[in-house]
Image: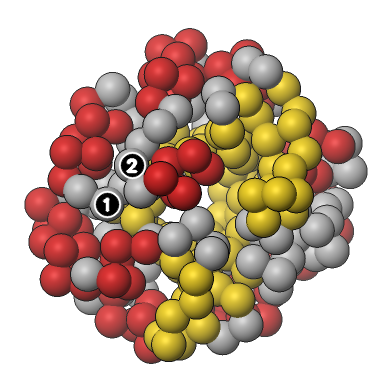
Amino acid sequence: MIILPAIDLRDGKCVRLIQGQYDHQITYKDNPAAQAVDFQTDGATWLHVVDLDGAKEGRPVNTQSIEAIVRQTSLHVEVGGGLRDENAIKTLLDIGVKRVIIGTRAVSDYDWFSEMARAFPGQIVLGLDARGSHVSTHGWQEDSALTILDFARQAAELPLAAIIYTDIAKDGMLCGPNIERTQAVAEAVNIPVIASGGVSKIDDIRDLLRVPSIHGVIAGRSLYEGTLNLKEAIALTQTS
């Protein structure tokens, strides 16, 4: 299982939103690239980046910060937030981003999402953000009528790199991941599924490791606040 430390960008800074609410923000560091270097030093090979401004605006906003991260590290970087047209995808891939995450437009325009998945095979990740059993969109500001499992099964027929399942109720709360629902998604599809939301301590990593169908886990606030040690978490995945 892969540990993906997270950097959420807002106004060029590392922040964390509590349950995706833009008026409940914690600001951690002013230099995202320096934070990425620290994660790499601790043993990370992948980095999960979310352009929060982009998710809200519907277009990439923090591209300059993302490019600095790519230039200053050798991390495999995946980026989500506001990717709703082909030019936005190309812009990020051209600056060295390994893969991009699409959520809102995957739900609102599945034909376009299918086209992008086939145009960029192995470089598109479905961001499956959920509140309860239903998919959420537009930076978690809106809920759709689509159920998680039905949409995951449909999308898994495309040449995607992975699915990231985020439980919004858990995100940023340090209350433990939704292992049961993540496992259900992972067992419903034949592509890698990454857990996101709620990871707070090393025992959460141990619990996730007991589910072999889960390919990776994203950790954010727990790393910044010191309740989870990245080196220890990575070492655990390598010995299990």
- Give me the residue at 84% from left, 63% from top: 175
Tag 2 residue: 59
- Give me the residue at 59% from left, 38% from top: 8
The answer to whether 55 is drawn above or below residue 27 in the figure is: below
Which quarter of the image is occupied by the N terminus?
A: bottom right
Which quarter of the image is occupied by the C terminus?
A: bottom right
The answer to whether 92 is drawn above or below residue 131 in the figure is: above
Residue type indicated by callout 2: Arg
CB atoms at circles 1 and 2 under 8 Å apart?
A: yes
In the structure shown, which secondary structural element does the residue marked by tag 1 occupy? Answer: loop
Q: Is residue 129 left or right of residue 157?
A: right
Tag 1 residue: 84
- Give me the residue at 79% from left, 34% from top: 224
Q: Residues within 10 Å of mark 1 (few under 14, many from 20)?
A: many
| Residue 189 locus on image (x, y percent) | 39, 78
Residue 160 in view here:
yes
Instruction: Please count the marks in the image.
Output: 2
